[in-house]
Image: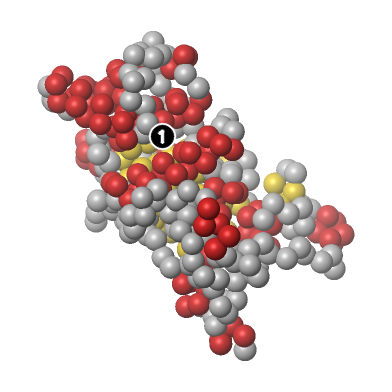
Amino acid sequence: MGVEIKVEGLTKRFGSQVIWNDVSLTLPAGEISVMLGPSGTGKSVFLKTLVGLLKPDAGAIWIQDRDLTQLREHDLYEVRKLFGVLFQDGALFGSMNLYDNVAFPLREHTKKSESDIRKIVLEKMDLVGLTGAESKLPGEISGGMRKRAGLARALVLDPEILLIDEPDSGLDPVRTSYINQLFIDLNAQIDATFLIVTHDINSTRTVPDNIGLLYHRHLAMFGPREMLLSSEEPVVRQFLNAQTIGPIGMSEEKDADELASERGQELPPLPPIPLQLGTSDGTPRRGERPPGEWCRANGITPPPGSFQSHNAGVPGVRPTEPVQPTEAAIS
């Protein structure tokens, strides 16, 4: 079962360079959260800091009433057992076949017998759709298969927290769809807390329960999916809707002259909020909410066409009626 992660005032520097400053958020237990941001905003650094591979310069990371930033190395080692990490390239050993790659954490960190290890490895490889590929080397398989092998390895110690770094990097849209569905199904099966770093806007709009955006050395916003997809905050609106009008420029932040030249330009309308991807077999997840629930509760009228049942033909997406605006939103 997943656990909550509470981050308070987290700051990270490399020398005099501030990567991000005073980041505070709560990753809800058992839910899928996504962290976005322009290149170079420290998203991967954030993952490595959460798991204790990098030490922050200030702030706290609370897991099960323990602040990871204050733990001694031995205690931190024990807490890390709660984590499974899927690195961007899968981080597989090129000289080992997939079976031995997946078995590696069990052999390193447990005293299980080889028969028990075999049972666990085959179970996790089946879970990610790699049955029959045990003897293959990483160089003999596709990028998508390498990522799934890395995911199987991240799962062998039954983590309560999964940190996933750019799983869609190097994948075509079809493979990205497959791995997105895999994350949704896994979340329902193992009830772990997921944090995914990605640049893929389509995945961000349909997969997570919560979305965060790192920008210009701080956390611009973090909250439920519908909150960010309906946000009028300029940097959030620009990034999540891939627009050129807004504060983000080619080198991250536009200067005053560029912003002044855009003043008065009409912004494109917000696109409809899509239905969230559901599990393949209809099993509910802990973080799953009725479409439009956040908008209704907060008196927000979603963009026209939101939550329409035209997505009903997409595997894993359950149809629903369009969300009607609330009286509060109309007034």
Residue 254's spot in the image, x, y percent?
76, 52
In the image, 133 versus 249, the foreground residue is: 133
Would residue 120 be found to the left or right of residue 255 on screen? left
The C terminus lies in quadrant: bottom right
Q: Residue at x 54, y 73 (%)?
A: 323
Q: Quadrant of residue 164?
A: top left
SS for dot 1: strand
Instruction: Residue 246: tell me if it is visible.
Output: yes
Picture quarter containing residue 273?
bottom right
Residue farthest along the right direction in this orientation? 261
- Residue 77 to residue 271: above or below: above
| Residue named by callout 1 | 86
User: Which residue is depicted at the point 63% across and 59% down?
Assistant: 236
Q: Position of residue 281 (x, y in %)?
A: 36, 50
| Above or below, comparing residue 185 to residue 117 in the picture | below
Decide if residue 223 is on the left or right side of residue 284. right
Q: Residue extending furthest front?
A: 313
What residue do we see at 70% from left, 46% from top? 252
State left or right for residue 153 relative to residue 199. Answer: left
- Please state the horizontal and vertical placement of residue 219, each as a whole percent of the image: 54, 56
Residue 323 or 154: which is nearer the viewer?
A: 323
Counting from the top left corner in percent of width and height, residue 203 is at: 54, 48
Q: Amino acid at mark 1?
A: Leu
